[in-house]
Every structure is written in structure tokens, then in C-alpha cells.
Image (cartoon, grey):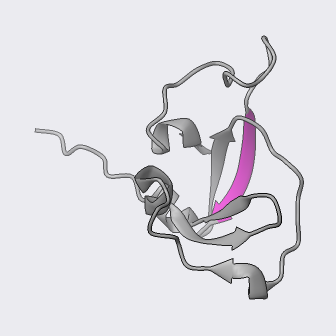
């Protein structure tokens, strides 16, 4: 299984635990299947799982942080926050350096 650090994909420093997590808290791997291959997205935490209506889905706002915008499909504007919908294809599109 190929594991991808979402911290690294978003340009943040790698840590063994996220700064907002308690000392000793381990990161979480979220398993996905894309194109018949298994991947793990390494994330700080997993929040609540929600089922959202398409009526609250909007395109990526122009003021969204560039790192997030590059990996986003769109957003849902919730009452108290903006929920970014990740574009899995964009996350998995990692340009590897070509060997010389």
C-alpha cells in the first residue's frame, strides 16, 4: 500500500504527532481504493463523518489557501465552518523526479 502524508502534500512540516494533538497521539491512516490500487492517506485526525447535500457544494473559493486549492474539488459552507472536499486524483498525482 502506498502511503501519502497529507501534511507533506499540503506543504506542512512532518511531525510524529500534530501540534494540536496531545503528546504521544499517533496519526491516522485513511484507506482508499483508486483505480484498483490501495492507498493510505496519513492524516492528523478524522473528525465526524457527514452526509451532505449537493445543494451546499460550491466551487473552490478564490481566497482558499493555494495548497488547499490545488487539492480541492470544491467546498461545503456549513453553519460554522468551511469544509474542503479533497480531489483524490489531485492528491495522488505526485510528480516524481526523473532519475538522471
- Residue at 67%, 21% (x, y): give it: 19
- Image quarter (top left, top right, bottom left or bottom right) of the C terminus: top left
Compared to residue 19, the image places residue 11 above or below, namely: below
Q: Is residue 5 visible?
A: no
- Image quarter (top left, top right, bottom left or bottom right) of the N terminus: top right
The answer to which of 80 and 68 lies nearer the viewer is 80
Pinpoint residue 70: horizontal percent, then vertical percent: 43, 60
- Residue at 52%, 25% (x, y): give it: 14
Confirm whether the magenta stretch covers residue 32: yes
Q: How many marks?
A: 0
Compared to residue 85, the image places residue 99 above or below, namely: above
Pinpoint residue 42: horizontal percent, then vertical percent: 65, 39
The answer to which of 72 and 64 lies nearer the viewer is 64
Pinpoint residue 67: horizontal percent, then vertical percent: 44, 51
**Which residue is situated farthest in the bottom direction here?**
55
94 left or right, relative to 32? left
5 left or right, relative to 31? left
- Residue at 88%, 72% (x, y): give it: 51
Confirm whether the magenta stretch covers residue 26: no
Residue 58, quarter of the rendered image? bottom right
83 left or right, relative to 79? left
Compared to residue 83, the image places residue 77 above or below, namely: below
Q: Looking at the magenta stretch, what is its main secondary structure?
A: strand
Pinpoint residue 7: horizontal percent, then vertical percent: 55, 37
Please give the range of residues in magenta. 28-33
Q: Is residue 85 visible?
A: yes
The answer to which of 75 and 78 lies nearer the viewer is 78
**Which residue is situated farthest in the left direction here?**
100
- Residue at 81%, 58% (x, y): give it: 80
Amino acid at each position: 500500500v502506498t502511503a501519502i502524508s497529507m501534511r507533506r502534500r499540503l506543504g506542512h512540516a512532518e511531525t510524529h504527532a500534530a501540534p494540536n494533538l496531545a503528546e504521544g497521539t499517533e496519526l491516522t491512516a485513511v484507506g482508499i481504493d483508486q483505480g484498483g490500487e490501495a492507498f493510505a492517506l496519513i492524516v492528523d485526525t478524522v473528525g465526524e463523518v457527514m452526509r451532505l447535500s449537493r445543494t451546499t457544494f460550491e466551487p473552490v473559493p478564490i481566497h482558499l489557501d493555494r495548497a488547499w486549492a490545488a487539492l480541492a474539488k470544491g467546498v461545503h459552507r456549513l453553519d460554522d465552518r468551511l469544509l474542503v472536499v479533497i480531489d483524490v486524483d489531485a492528491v495522488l498525482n505526485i510528480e516524481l523526479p526523473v532519475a538522471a
